[in-house]
Image (cartoon, rainbow, N blue to C red):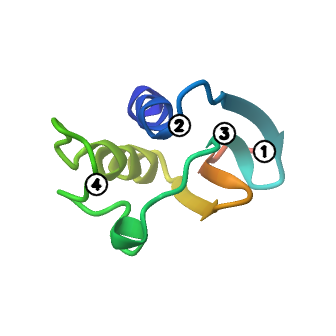
């Protein structure tokens, strides 16, 4: 899951752009964020996590974010994203941290 999301972030980042990965534990569980300064094209925003959704990649299969979502859901988690010209793109994965003791 993380490999797909980080690979996508690197490929979508402008030349010389940074990709950051952060992890924190909060009330929702484990929160992972992957950020790059690229913008998700308008044409795929509504289908970002759908099977076969891809844009601008010569060898893109459209399975990266789709499979990441399936993996997150299999672990009772979820994935969301935000994108804007000024802030770039952030993909957020939230996974439960386990039973409370």
| Residue 67 percent location from the top left of the image | 30, 45
Quarter in which the C terminus is drawn: top right
Nearer-N-terminus badge (1/4): 4
Secondary structure of residue under mark 2: loop
Name the residue that disc number 2 marks.
13
Q: Residues within 10 Å of mark 2 (few under 14, many from 20)?
A: some
User: Label 3 to label 1, Cα distance in Å?
Assistant: 20 Å
Badges 3 and 2: C-beta atoms under 8 Å apart? Answer: no
Quarter in which the N terminus is drawn: top left
Q: Nearer the viewer, residue 11 or 7?
A: 11
Q: Looking at the image, which residue is at 65% across and 52% down?
A: 88
Q: Nearer the viewer, residue 71 or 34?
A: 34
* Front of the two marks 3 and 2: 2
Name the residue that disc number 4 marks.
55
The residue sitting at the front extreme is 15
Name the residue that disc number 1 marks.
100
Q: Residues within 10 Å of mark 4 (few under 14, many from 20)?
A: some
User: Label 2 to label 4, Cα distance in Å?
Assistant: 13 Å
Q: Residues within 10 Å of mark 3 (few under 14, many from 20)?
A: some
Secondary structure of residue under mark 3: strand
Name the residue that disc number 3 marks.
32
Secondary structure of residue under mark 1: loop
């Amino acid at each position: 899951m993380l490999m797909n999301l980080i690979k996508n972030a690197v490929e979508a980042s402008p030349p010389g752009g940074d990709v950051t990965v952060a992890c924190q534990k909060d009330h929702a569980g484990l929160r992972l964020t992957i950020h790059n300064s690229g913008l998700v094209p308008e044409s795929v925003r509504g289908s970002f996590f759908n099977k076969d959704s891809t844009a601008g990649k010569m060898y893109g299969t459209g399975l990266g974010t789709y499979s990441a979502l399936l993996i997150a859901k299999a672990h009772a988690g979820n994935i969301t994203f935000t994108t804007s010209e000024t802030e770039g793109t952030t993909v957020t994965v939230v996974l439960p941290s386990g039973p409370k003791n």
